[in-house]
Image (cartoon, helix red, strand yellow):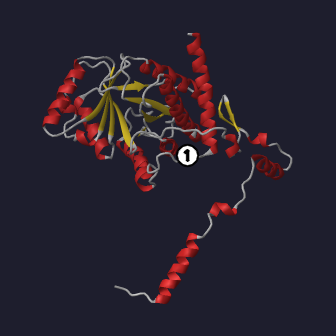
Amino acid sequence: MLQYSRCSRKRATSNRDSIMKKPNLFDQFPSSTKSHWIDRVNRDLKGRSPDDLNFQLAPELEISPFHHIEDITEKIDIPTRFCSEIFLGYHLNVTDEFTDNQLITEQLAGGVNYLSISFGNLQSLDFQKLFKGVFLSMIQLHLEVTKHNTLIDSFLKFAANQKKSGQDIRFWITCEEEAQGFHKVSLINPLKENSIYLILGQILYQGNHILESVEIPEQVILRLPFGHDYLLNICQVRAARLLWANLCDLHNTTTCVPLIIEGHASPSIPQKDHYANMIALSQVGVSMITAGSDVIFLPPSDANTVNEGTEFSRRISRNIYHLLQLECHMGIVHDPTAGSYFFDKTASEIASQTWHSFSKNITNA
């Protein structure tokens, strides 16, 4: 064991005391009011008005680039993402068990851990063939059907048999014809509109229909489209979570029903040049994680020319997630934009306008 001299101990104690007495870094800077800040901006602009720097975040939304704590008139408590980790999703429209099994195994081997499967109007399916070689207990399944039919019963029987063999499948089943899904999970799927207000309005109307049902679901999945605009994507998610919390309060739910957000890159993202699409999808992926999505879906960069994209483009899309999640560690912080005056104020304004329109229409109805 190392022995320290009395002098060394005294010096260490002195250093520790000086560190403990060290003032907070931010105490060295005087606080500044917004008016003082604007005066400095006016001097820097040399006669130009600060309003000249305003920009359109959306066709109906003009934003100032200057935001201050004085703009936040009340505390904004926005719920964070529900899942402890951010899942990488893959959506598949089932047509053929053999071909689709190859796609599924390729995606799972590449790191996908959330499968969203749509069965359309299929009445029967061989789930043994579809999930051959797949360890279903290691992923999350979201199954979508248009109506309750024999296909659902067939899957439930398949899941029961898998459980007996030691694979406990984690799955959700949502049905288009019913507000209430299976395993007490419902789906909100707004149409892909150009206006953020129309998207959020659809979320409120569909969510209101779900919460008016006799049995309130334990979880709600929100399928949210993400476009080109990085800032707008983040504001959209924060506004959606604010509105959902208000809707749960309106229906006097004992707690806010967990909202699981699936972030889907909008079909408008893939253009003709799939190399440019790779860069665009990287930006969209960053905005999905920064906004607090629970699951992110990034289509292949050439999905507009090849239905499911090429094997190379599918791998690149998965690698965007892996770089952001595993190398940049972006998913560690649950709500990285919390405390941003810009995002808090803008999301609050968007949510307030959407809620006002919704309340007005509900009252008139």
In the image, 225 versus 64, the foreground residue is 64
* Residue 74 position (above or below residue 207): below
Answer with left or right where residue 225 lies relative to residue 49: left
The total number of labels drawn is 1
* Residue 357 position (above or below residue 108): above
* Residue 277 position (above or below residue 23): above
Q: How far across and how far down the image is residue 136, in percent?
A: 24, 39
Residue beneath the point at 28% across and 46% down: 109
**Label 1: element kind:** loop
In the image, 348 versus 189, the foreground residue is 348
* Residue 50 position (above or below residue 205): below
Q: Amino acid at mark 1?
A: Thr
Say which residue label 1 marks: 337
Answer with left or right where residue 39 lies relative to residue 66: right
Question: As drawn, which residue projects farthest toward the top?
Answer: 365
Crowding at label 1, few (<14), some or many (≥20) Cα neighbours within 10 Å? some
Can see residue 52?
Answer: yes
Answer with left or right where residue 36 lies relative to residue 218: right
